[in-house]
Image (tube, rainbow, N blue to C red):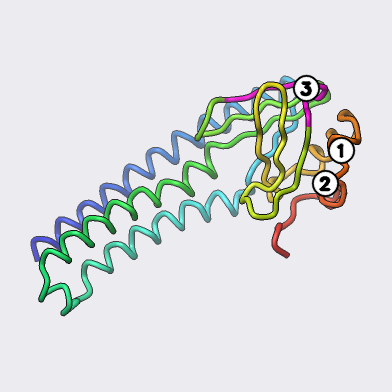
Amino acid sequence: MKKEILVLSYCLIHLAILSVVRSSLWRKWRLRAQVAGDEGYSVLRYSDFRRNAGWFLSALLLALLLASYLCPWDFYEQLPWVEFTAGSALLLAGSLAAWYPVIESQGRLILVRDEGVRAISPWSRSISFKWNEVTSLRWIPILPENFVIRTTRGIMFVSPVLLNLDIFAKQVMRNVPRERWMSSEKMLRKAERGPFEPYR
């Protein structure tokens, strides 16, 4: 029983920390979006549904993690070292996995205007570039963020599910030489109509 109480306490504390981080990231995101709008940028962002879904998935992962400890497993009782090793690995992996959907959905911001793009990512340094610095745009189906833009300043990834995707697509086709994106023209034309699920 002591173990279950410790794990429950850990999950609740972890969830509370996630809540604080989510609120902090949301405030920063909203401020940045407001400033970007004042500067003439269009903001590519996840929908409110996806941001809330990220939070729900994080909570669900922690709930499943807790359930795995509360369920009796006779196999583990026969091999205590397996229980310790598997339990510790599951606890660590579940805790780390719970952070991804919250940070990704609340921390990513892509700003687009006639002059160029500025991308703010929670996973890497921010990148800014002008449209004439784009060297290629590719659609890669196996990636979660399928539009891959290579520039003289670095690489940027854009998910097709972001709101205002149509603005991004139109700016690319208007400002980037066609030979640099023609291999992905079909998907850019689709993006002109708005965000879409890549696997449908």
Of 67 and 146, the residue lying toward us:
146
Mark closest to the chain's N terminus, 3 or 2: 3
Residue 91 percent location from the top left of the image: 27, 55
Quadrant assignment, res 177 = top right
List the residue tagged with mark 2: 184
Of 86 and 127, the residue lying toward us:
86
Q: Residue at x 19, y 57 (%)?
A: 7
Measured Cα–Cα span from mark 3 to mark 2: 18 Å
Measured Cα–Cα span from mark 3 to mark 1: 17 Å
Element assignment for label 3: helix
Element assignment for label 2: helix
Q: Residue at x 86, y 38 (%)?
A: 170
Measured Cα–Cα span from mark 1 to mark 2: 13 Å
Where is 127 relative to 7, above or below?
above
Could you tell me the amino acid type at mark 1?
A: Lys
Left or right: residue 107 compared with residue 81: right
Could you tell me the amino acid type at mark 3?
A: Glu
Mark closest to the chain's N terminus, 1 or 2: 1
Could you tell me the amino acid type at mark 2?
A: Ser
Q: Quadrant of the C terminus?
A: bottom right
Left or right: residue 104 compared with residue 190: left
List the residue tagged with mark 1: 170
List the residue tagged with mark 3: 133
Magenta stretch contains residue 145: no
